[in-house]
Image (cartoon, rainbow, N blue to C red):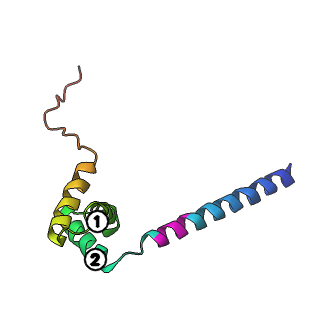
C-alpha cells in the first residue's frame, strides 16, 4: 500500500508544479504594460481605491474601445466601468434584529 501512496504523492506534486508554473507565467505576461497603460492604471487605482493590477483590466478595455480619447476621459470611463462591475454591497442598516 505504501508504494501506491508514494506514487500518488509524486503525481500530485507534479500536477501542482505544472499548474503553479503556468499561473506564474500567465501573471508575468499579463503585467507587461505600456507607459500609457501604467499611468492610466495608477490614476484609476487612486480614484477607484483599488490596486493597479485590478484597474489595469478596465484601462485596457477602455483603450481597446477608444484609443484616440484623452487620458482624462479614459481614466473617468475606466473608473466608472470598474466600479459598475463590482458586486453590489448589501446594506444591513434596516434589517430587523429580532428573529421572526
- Residue depicted at x 22% and y 63%: 49
Q: Are marks 1 and 2 in contact (CB under 8 Å)?
A: yes
Q: Is residue 34 above or below residue 74?
A: below
Q: Is residue 5 above or below residue 13?
A: above
Q: Is residue 91 above or below residue 35?
A: above
Q: Which residue is the site of mark 1?
A: 63
Label 1 sits on a secondary structure element that is: helix
Residue 40: horizontal and vertical position, in percent? Answer: 24, 72
> Distance from label 1 to label 2 (Cα)?
10 Å
- Residue depicted at x 30% and y 75%: 38
Q: Which residues are magenta?
A: 23-29
Task: Residue 34: name its quadrant.
Answer: bottom left
Residue 56: horizontal and vertical position, in percent? Answer: 32, 66
- Residue depicted at x 17% and y 71%: 70
Residue 52: horizontal and vertical position, in percent? Answer: 30, 69
Query: Mark 1 Cα within 10 Å, few/some/many (few <14, many 20+)?
Result: some
Disc number at residue 36? 2
Amino acid at each position: 500500500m505504501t508504494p501506491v501512496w508514494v506514487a500518488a504523492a509524486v503525481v500530485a506534486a507534479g500536477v501542482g508544479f505544472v499548474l503553479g508554473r503556468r499561473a506564474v507565467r500567465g501573471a508575468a505576461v499579463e503585467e507587461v504594460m505600456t507607459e500609457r497603460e501604467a499611468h492610466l492604471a495608477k490614476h484609476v487605482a487612486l480614484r477607484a481605491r483599488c490596486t493597479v493590477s485590478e484597474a489595469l483590466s478596465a484601462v485596457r478595455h477602455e483603450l481597446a474601445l477608444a484609443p484616440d480619447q484623452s487620458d482624462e476621459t479614459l481614466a473617468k470611463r475606466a473608473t466608472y466601468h470598474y466600479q459598475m462591475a463590482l458586486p453590489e454591497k448589501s446594506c444591513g442598516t434596516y434589517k430587523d434584529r429580532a428573529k421572526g
